[in-house]
Amino acid sequence: MRKLIITAFTAALLAGGAAQAKEWTKIRFGVEGAYPPFSSMTEDGELQGFDIDIAHALCEQMNAECTLVPQDWDGIIPALLARKYDAIIASMSITEERKKKVNFTDKYYQTPARFARPRGSGVEISAADLKGKKVGVQRATIHDNFLTEVFGDEVEVVRYGSQDEAYLDAVSGRLDLLMADAVALMDGFLNTEQGGGWEFVGPPYTDVKYFGEGAGIAVRKRDSDLQEQLNAAIAAIRANGVYRQINEKYFDFDIYGN
C-alpha cells in the first residue's frame, strides 16, 4: 500500500509539473550587434537589423517584454549558459556541434556561404589558386570551421572577432579572399562604398555537415518550454504576414529558404 501511495504521489507531481510550463512574459535575447544587415548598431547606439526586428516580432506575438543584450560572438553561447540572457538570436546556424551545448528552435532563415575577392585579382577557388592565399573569416563560426577543414592545407586562415574587422583588413589590402554568409557579404560589404572593389567568386556552399540546417534561436537545454513557445511564434509570424514584412524591409528575395 505504501508503495502504491508513493507511486501515485510521484505521478501527480510529474503531471503537475508538465501542466505548469513557464509562461515567458519577459525574454532577454543575446544579439551580436556587429553583423549587418542582420544585426548592427546605429550611430546613436540603437540596435537594428533583420535579427533585431524578428526578436521584437516574436516577443509581440508572445505578449512578452523584449530585452536585447549585445554580446561578442566568441562568448555568445557561454553567456547564455551563464544566464546572462534567455535565448540567442544572432544568425546562429543549427549545427550538430552546437546542439551538444544548446537546443535550437526551428530555423527562421537559411542562406549559403560564399567567397569574395578583389575585382580583377583573378583568384579562383581551386587548390592550386588558393595556395598561400590569406582568407579572412569571423572566428568560431561555421565559415571558420569549413575553411579550416576543407581548405586549411592550402590557405592561411586569418580570424577576426567580428565581420567588420575582416572587412577593414580586406579594404586595406591585407587579405586575398573573404568567406562569410552570402547575404552578410553582399549587404554588409559588397554593396557598400567600402566594399565596392570586391566581388563574389566560386559557388555557394550549403553542405549541412558544415553549414547546418539554417539559422535558429538557441536556448538552454532546460528551457524546452521557451523553445516550444518560440517555435509557435515563428510559425505564427510566418502565417500572419509579419515575417514577410520584415523580410521585404531588408531583402528583395525570400530569405527563409527551402
Image (tube, helix red, strand yellow):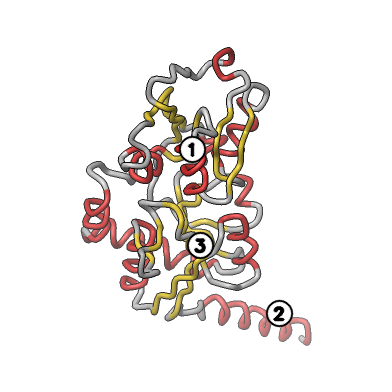
SS class, disc 2: helix
The residue labelled by disc 1 is 172
SS class, disc 1: loop
Mark closer to the chain start, 3 or 2: 2
Tell me where residue 248 appears, x and y as whole percent: 22, 51
> Which mark is in front, 2 or 1?
1
The residue labelled by disc 2 is 7
SS class, disc 3: strand
> Which mark is in front, 1 or 3?
1
Identified at 59% across, 65% down, the residue is 220
**Amino acid type indicated by mark 1:** Ser
Apparent side of residue 241 relative to residue 258 in the rendered image (left or right): left
Residue 96 is drawn in which quadrant? top right
**Amino acid type indicated by mark 2:** Thr
Q: Nearer the viewer, residue 8 or 121?
A: 121
Q: Quadrant of the N terminus?
A: bottom right
Mark closer to the chain start, 2 or 1: 2
Q: CA distance from mark 3 to mark 2?
A: 39 Å
